[in-house]
Image (cartoon, rainbow, N blue to C red):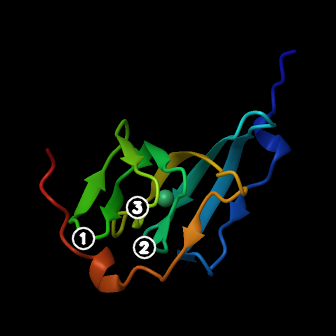
Amino acid sequence: MTKIIRANARDTKTQPPTNFVGTVYADEVSVGEAPSRMRATRVTFTPGGRTNWHTHPVGQVLFCLIGVGRYQLEGDQVHEIRPGDTVIIPPGAKHWHGSAPGQLFSHLALSENDDDGRGADWLEPVSDEDYNAAPAPMT
Ligand code: MN
């Protein structure tokens, strides 16, 4: 049966300061019911907003919607990401994502929980030095 969840049926949530720096909003798109494990969330980062460093046991896909963003895998340069870009994050890879300095940014976050129901393991905040680093040239 068709199920349409209207835009105003669910309020925007502010992400907790335990796992994020700055003001970050989350709008739930869908949470799959078993046997589906699909989760989709639109995440909006205000300027300066970013996740803490974290990992996803089953990996994550980000699809960039608006604005200018940042993404970094531990040990790699920070990368600028823009609307239409898709970021594939491998299982267990330590990383962060967020806005570019001074810019609003939204992405669709697509992920699945593992067998224990875990979708992310949260680590330390991203330092201002890491956040403000010049991004790698776009390829
Ligand atoms: Mn992530």
Q: Which residue is mark 3?
A: 93
Which image quarter: residue 35?
top right
Ligand 1 neighbours mark 3 (CB distance < 8 Å):
no
> What amino acid is at disc 1?
Gly
- Specify whether 130 is left or right of 59: left
Q: Which mark is residue 47?
A: none
Q: What separation in Å lies between label 3 and label 2 (alpha carbons)? A: 23 Å
Q: Position of residue 60 (x, y in %)?
A: 49, 49
Q: Which residue is mark 1?
A: 75
Residue furthest top in the image: 1
- Specify whether 76 is left or right of 114: left
Q: Earlier in the sequence, mark 3 or mark 2?
A: 2
Which image quarter: residue 128?
bottom left
Height in image: 46 above or below 109? below
Q: Earlier in the sequence, mark 1 or mark 2?
A: 2
Ligand 1 neighbours mark 2 (CB distance < 8 Å):
no
Callout 1 touching callout 2 (CB < 8 Å): no
Q: Secondary structure at mark 1?
A: loop
Q: Which residue is mark 2?
A: 48
Q: Secondary structure at mark 3?
A: loop
Tell me what residue is drawn at x 34 percent, y 60 percent: 70
Tell me what residue is drawn at x 80 percent, y 36 percent: 34
Q: Residues within 10 Å of mark 3 (few under 14, many from 20)?
A: some
Height in image: 129 above or below 19? below
- Specify whether 96 is left or right of 136: right
Residue furthest right in the image: 1
Which image quarter: residue 97?
bottom left
